[in-house]
Amino acid sequence: MSASALSEAVTTQNIQPLFPDVDWQPVIDAIASADKILLTTHCNPDGDGIGSQQAMYDALIAMGKNVVMHNCDGVPRIYSFLKYTDQVTMGSWSADSQDADLVIALDCGAKGRLGMADSFYEGAQLINIDHHVSNKYFADINIVDARYCATGAMIFDMLIAMDIALTKFTASAIYAAVLTDTASFRLSNATAAVYRMAADLIDAGAEPWPISINIYESQPVAGLNILKSCLDTLELRDDNRSAWIHVTHDMYEKTGADVEDAEGLIDYARSIDGVEVAVFIRCDENHEHFWKVSFRGKTTADVGALAATLGGGGHKHAAGCSMRGSFEEVRSAVEMAVSQILG
């Protein structure tokens, strides 16, 4: 790191971690001994996965480490404002060309969700840093803690444990991760400690308004068109305690939208008064009869447990799964599971 960059960075010595009881030493030791580090996150990455990856990349290159970033899928457009997103490669990667001796998986609950063949990890130590309660503990070193609101918040604590100063960019990437995984600090996981962390990130240079504009207010017209089309599918079931919306291939084609434009649509369903569970079923853009199902809970309903019954996972108030079959078959199976959890 240059002298000017160091002068702009904020020391973490006087910053309090969210959870000081977490033992980061195994990760610190693995990073110290690694010659080349690869950072990755789950398929169809979200703000937490990308923000965590970007923040960790910035911190590690400041240490002088040899670091690369590679994901199965590309960086969503709304996160392209982050500094190093053009450094993220994507797609399948053969074992012959993957020469990192340390792979760090971020914000991923299961190895399969990384989208890589098992041969991808051969010869490398694997670290799993995640906050999903449904995590499968799939790595050599697992730092998994569902108390955290976001994996980005875990990176915040890790940097404090490593005594690495927060640059403006690191703080911005972590802020983006936390902002998106707390639904703009509206979910129950936005505790007082999370707000104090946000203040520390702002003190270090994160700018909430520009970050929010890039993530939430840079939508193409196609995004509004798919919103209108999707809301036309809205149905209330289970005595108006569940709200349902969906997106099909035809809807994408008619509106010119894509999967990125469909992000956040489920929040409209959850916002309805009296709704406890919101369900969003969307087609996979590339595979026929393959569906992504997202769940959002409002108060008492545990949608993480709901998703687990369908082979998925997540948090109490935000979860999802993938299913195969016709739309009618998937819808029927999900309806049964939702009705059971709502009693």
Image (tube, rainbow, N blue to C red):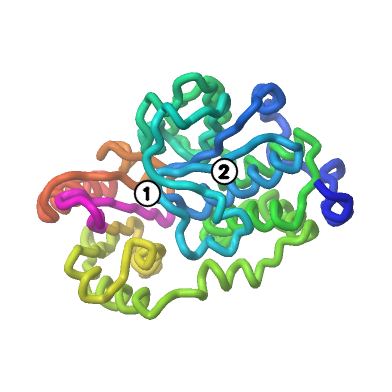
Residue 149 shown left or right of residue 198 in the figure = left
Q: Is residue 283 magenta?
A: yes
Mark 1 neighbour density, 10 Å: few (under 14) some (14–19) many (20 or more)? some
- Per the image, label 2 sits on a secondary structure element best described as helix
The residue wearing badge 1 is 301
Q: Amino acid at mark 2?
A: Thr
Residue beneath the point at 14% across and 55% down: 327
Q: Distance of mark 1 from mark 2, alpha carbons?
A: 23 Å
Label located before the other in sequence (1 or 2): 2
Q: Nearer the viewer, residue 328 or 207?
A: 207
Q: Nearer the viewer, residue 201 or 255?
A: 255
Could you tell me residue 90's position as x and y percent?
A: 43, 47
Q: What is the span of residues highlighted in magenta in the rendered image? A: 281-302
Q: Nearer the viewer, residue 341 or 256?
A: 256
Residue beneath the point at 53% across and 61% down: 79
Q: Is residue 16 above or below residue 298?
A: above
- Per the image, label 1 sits on a secondary structure element best described as loop
Residue 302 can be seen in this image = no
Q: Amino acid at mark 1?
A: Ala
The residue wearing badge 2 is 151
Could you tell me residue 340's position as x and y percent?
A: 23, 44
Residue beneath the point at 50% across and 65% down: 78
Residue furthest out toward the front: 96
Q: Is residue 226 above or below residue 103?
A: below
Residue 196 can be seen in this image = yes
